[in-house]
Image: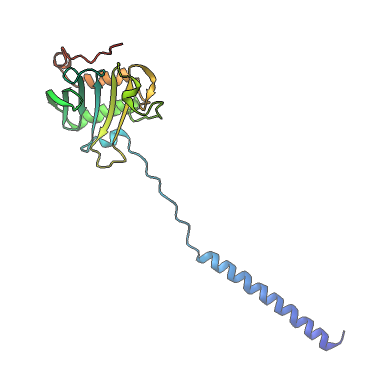
């Protein structure tokens, strides 16, 4: 190989090394300039005790069997940061025919919500029957609700029935324990519901 050929081969080798060096440098620089990918933030649902200092309220509504309008009854207990209330309702429009309220405070509400949290008050499941009143027309319906959170995504109403524990959207409990906790928030509960019939027909 003469000197001219050697010069050309050497030049080509240098050019190849320079080309690949520039390519590698640009690739590294581009990777450094890339912004990190945005990670979606998953909004976690609040636990019940986190509502203790808010206007949110929890309630249990015991709905009697499907009978005549005038005879149909519901017993609803609502507990909030400032108040504990029992309402007796008549008919399917829910007309309040008896009500009584008691003072509450944030500390007491916080303890109550912690008890409900321990009983999975917010737990839900997919119902076998979508329409709760098709599920158990002669039985008692139990409604468990969280309202006035300020968000439609956080408010909820879950239900179960006396016909069977596997029916409904409510998956917490035991239900009787939760309902007893609510009843104990009303000092003269027994006197207020005396004569109010929400017993199943079957």
The image quarter in which residue 105 lies? top left
Please give left or right for residue 198 compared with residue 129 in the image. left
- Give the answer, above or below, for where 84 lies relative to 47: above
Q: Quadrant of residue 44?
A: top left
Question: From the image, which quarter does the N terminus lie in?
Answer: bottom right
Q: Would residue 144 be found to the left or right of residue 197 on screen?
A: right
State the residue at coordinates (22%, 30%): 109
In the depicted view, which residue is nearer to us: 135 or 195? Answer: 135
Q: Is residue 129 or residue 77 the one in the foreground?
A: 129
What x and y, as percent, mark residue 156? 30, 34
| For residue 35, side relative to residue 81 (left or right) | right
Where's the C terminus, which quadrant? top left
Q: Is residue 195 left or right of residue 137?
A: left
Please identify the residue farthest to the right as the structure is shown: 1
Q: Nearer the viewer, residue 73 or 113?
A: 73
The residue shown at (20%, 28%) is: 79
In this view, which residue lies farthest toward the front?
A: 68
Percent across and percent down for residue 78 are 20, 27
Residue 16 rendering spot, x and y as whole percentages: 71, 76
Give the percent coordinates (x, y) of residue 30: 54, 67
Picture layout, residue 36 above or below residue 79? below
Closer to the camera in the image, 86 or 46: 86
How is this picture coloured?
rainbow
Q: How many marks?
A: 0
Residue at image point 34% right, 30% down: 122
Task: Tell me if residue 88 comes above or below residue 195 in the rendering.
Answer: below
Residue at 74%, 83% in the rendered image: 11
């Amino acid at each position: 190989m003469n000197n001219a050929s050697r010069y050309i081969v050497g030049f080509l080798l240098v050019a190849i090394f320079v080309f690949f060096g520039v390519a590698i440098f640009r690739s590294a620089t581009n990777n450094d300039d890339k912004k990190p990918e945005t990670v979606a933030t998953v909004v976690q649902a609040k636990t019940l005790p986190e509502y203790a200092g808010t206007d949110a309220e929890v309630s249990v509504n015991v709905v009697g069997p499907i009978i005549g309008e005038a005879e149909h009854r519901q017993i609803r207990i609502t507990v909030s940061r400032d108040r504990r209330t029992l309402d007796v309702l008549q008919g399917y429009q829910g007309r309040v025919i008896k009500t009584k309220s008691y003072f509450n405070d944030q500390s007491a509400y916080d303890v109550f919500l912690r008890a409900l949290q321990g009983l999975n008050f917010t737990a839900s499941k997919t119902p076998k029957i979508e329409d709760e009143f098709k599920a158990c027309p002669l039985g008692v319906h139990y409604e468990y609700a969280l309202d006035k959170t300020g968000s439609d995504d956080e408010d909820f109403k879950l239900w179960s029935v006396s016909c069977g524990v596997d029916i409904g959207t409510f998956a917490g409990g035991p239900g009787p324990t939760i309902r007893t906790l609510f009843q104990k928030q009303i000092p003269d509960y027994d006197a207020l519901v005396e004569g109010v019939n929400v017993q199943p027909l079957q």
